[in-house]
Structures are given as C-alpha cells and as structure tokens.
Amino acid sequence: MRVALVTESFPPDVNGVAHCALRTAEHLVARGHAPLVIAPTAPGRDRAAEADAAAPCPVIRVPSLPLPGYRQVRVALPGRRVAAAIAAHRAQLVHLASPFVIGAHGVAGAARLGLPCVAVYQTDLGGYARAYLGIGETAAWHRLRSLHTAADRTLAPSTASAADLERHGIPRVHLWPRGVDAVRFHPAHRDPALRRELAPGGEVLVGYVGRLAPEKRVELLAGAAELPGVRLVVVGDGPSAANLRSALPSAVFLGRRTGRELARIYASLDVFAHTGPMETFCQTVQEAMASGIPVVAPAAGGPLDLVSPGRTGLLVPPDDPEALRDAVRRLAGTPRLRAAYGLAGREAVAGRSWAAVGDLLIGHYEQVLAERLATSAVAA
C-alpha cells in the first residue's frame, strides 16, 4: 500500500504528533508498505537533515514559519508542493496527522486526485487557537469540521475525544489509541545514582514530562512542589519555561530529554503528575505507566481512558491545585500504594505495543479502501 502521510509535525520536533507520525511510518515500512512523509520544514537545518536521513521512509519538507508565541511549532505556508508530492508518490491513500494547516493541503490534494483520506485527531486545536493564534474556539472547530468531514474516516485516540468530535458535528469517527514502547519505558531502568542526584535528601520524586506551554498548566504543581519530603522534577521545554522556573523555585528543571535518558528519568520517579486538562490522549501518562510509576492526572480527556482510579493512579478535578496537591501527598506518603498502582499500571499498558496499534491503523486503511471500492462499483 502506498500511503502519503501528511503531518503537521515530524522529528526533529519533539511532541505527540511528531512521535506518532514517526511510529506510523516505521510500522508501515515494517509491514511492507510504502509511506511518504510530507511535513513542514523544521528549525535547525542540520538537526532536520539528520532526522530526515534517519527516517524510515522519504520525507518531503514544505516551507513553513514559526507559530507566533511558540517558535518551536511550525506552520506550513500555502503552495502546491503537498499535492505534487502525493501525486509523485502514486499514493493510494492519504493519512492526515492532526490536520489543520498542512493537512488542509493534504485534503485538497487527495480530493483532486480522487484518493481516500484518513484523518487522525490528536491535538485540542481549539485550545491552541485561543492560546496562540488569537482566534476563537468556534472558528477553530469550524476549520476542523471542514477538514475532518472531507475525510473518509476520522480516528480519535480516546473515548473523550471521540465524543468531543461527534459533539461538534464531525462524522465517521472511530477509535484508534496510541502505542507505547514497553521495552524502552520499563521499571528496570530505575537508576539509584540519578535518584541520589535529584533527591539528595531522600525526597519522594514527583515528575512532570511534557511541553512547557500555557495549555499544560504546569504551574498547578506549585502546591505539590512545596510538600515536605517531595522534590518536583520537570522535564521538557517550551514558551512557559522561564515563567515556570519562577513559579516553581524548588523544582529541578531538566530541559528536554529523549530516548534512553528519558526512560531512565521516568523509571526513577516515584509519582508522575500530569496537569493539562486538554489532552486528547496523553502519551506521557502511558509512558509513565509502562515505567511502573503511579499517575495523578486530571479527570478529563485522554487520561479518563488511561488511568483507573484507585488501581493505577488517581484522577483529580481539572484546574484544581488543591486536589492535585492532596493526591500527590497521598501517594508520596504511602509507598505500598505507589508500588501497587505502579505494578497495575505496567500491566495495563504492557500489551499496547506500537506494532499492535499500527496493525489496527492498517485495518482502518483497508476498510476505507474497501468502502471506496464498493462506492465506485455502485456508481458504475
């Protein structure tokens, strides 16, 4: 199968969309298919060239500009390169990863070539529009509805996001979760030396991993960071980094970490705390669970599917710093509970490999192609 994977982000970017697009391309190649990635140009010419050379398939870059207020995010410029790349690849199907800007060119190109589209919903773009683009959520949903309605099928990562899509009038919504590398993210990577470095007084390590951006609400951890015997560890980078260093003066900021180093940090934590209320899935929660770490997260969006309260972690009301602090305090003070939740969390996600999830995606592709073929036969 020849697939054009049109994505709003791709490595060297570090975010959920880029990671999922990379894993999708890897799996398609592993299963004998022929993907092509079409993505915006990335900042840092050398880093981008290195990432493209390491990619599992060819990568076509489309000119882009940095998003105002968040330069790490790139926005593709208008042009015909996307449609031309799809045609040159002789694609049979177009995969739209979190479509909004470059995804619109993908939709138009697919329509012009008579190709089916599968659109993957992955980011709360309404929230992004409010935070960074200065447009209302209604306008953002209008654009999303137009893009996803033009697709043959929309894949949502969680039941909460599927319900949100349907509530906004988007048709043909199906579930497609995200995978996790349960070998890389594993309790065996717990590192006593790293723990001594981060918590020289034997503190309980509470960690956040993710972008440091307004919609992530990391400042809600201020109360938890001041609990006696707790050391907050923040991993990530973004436009809110400087403000968060001021808001969380007792926290350890490690910046952006990836690969084995990130896995070692996860496994060396005692509690994982997520704060953002707008997650469509929340891959970092799943990575923490694979690492055997109990989770505290908002009772909203993707975490509702991932965290089983009282079994793998605790869910708290969104945007409630007191509830977040109290949940962290409960886990910090109860080692047996942390161990039980961590073990149950590991067991819950151990079977969610990227291979298994990738095969589900290929199943969606095959169904969409069969539906198109049936429709063409009826029309004939």
Image (cartoon, grey):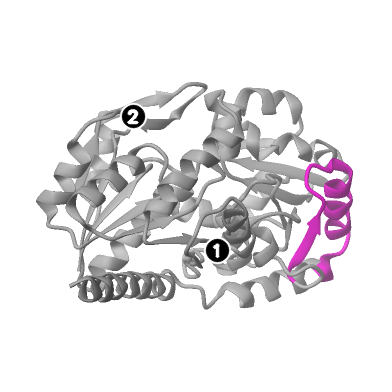
Farthest-out residue, front? 379
The picture places residue 363, in percent across and down from the top left corner, at 36, 75
**Does the rendering let one see residue 61?**
yes
The picture places residue 121, in percent across and down from the top left corner, at 48, 53
Query: Which span is picked out in magenta?
Result: 312-337
Query: Which is in the foreground here, disc 1 or disc 2?
Result: 2
Category of crowding for the residue at label 1, using alpha-carbon neighbours closer than 10 angstroms: few (below 14), some (14–19), many (at least 20): some
Q: Which mark is residue 43?
A: 2
Which residue is under mark 1? 189
Separation of residues labelled 1 and 2 (CA atoms)? 32 Å
Q: Could you tell whether 49 is left or right of 248 in the image?
A: left
Q: Could you tell whether 119 is left or right of 376 in the image?
A: right
Identity of the amino acid at label 2?
Answer: Pro
Query: Which corner quadrant of the image does residue 337 belong to?
Result: bottom right
Q: Which residue is drawn at 82% across and 65% down?
A: 335
Query: Which corner quadrant of the image does residue 102 belong to?
Result: top left
Identity of the amino acid at label 1?
Answer: His
Please tell me which of labels 1 and 2 falls first in the chain.
2
The picture places residue 220, in percent across and down from the top left corner, at 77, 38
The picture places residue 198, in percent across and down from the top left corner, at 67, 44
In the rendered image, the quadrant that contains the N terminus is: bottom left
Up/down of 207 relative to 28, above or below = above
Q: Which mark is residue 121?
A: none
Up/down of 11 relative to 243, above or below = below
**Does the rendering let one see residue 49?**
no
Q: Could you tell whether 85 is left or right of 247 in the image?
A: left
Q: Which residue is drawn at 70% across and 75% down?
A: 344
Q: Nearer the viewer, residue 346 or 68?
A: 68
Q: Nearer the viewer, residue 267 or 55?
A: 55
Q: Which of 150 and 28 is in front in this view?
A: 150
Magenta span has 336?
A: yes
In the rendered image, the quadrant that contains the C terminus is: bottom left
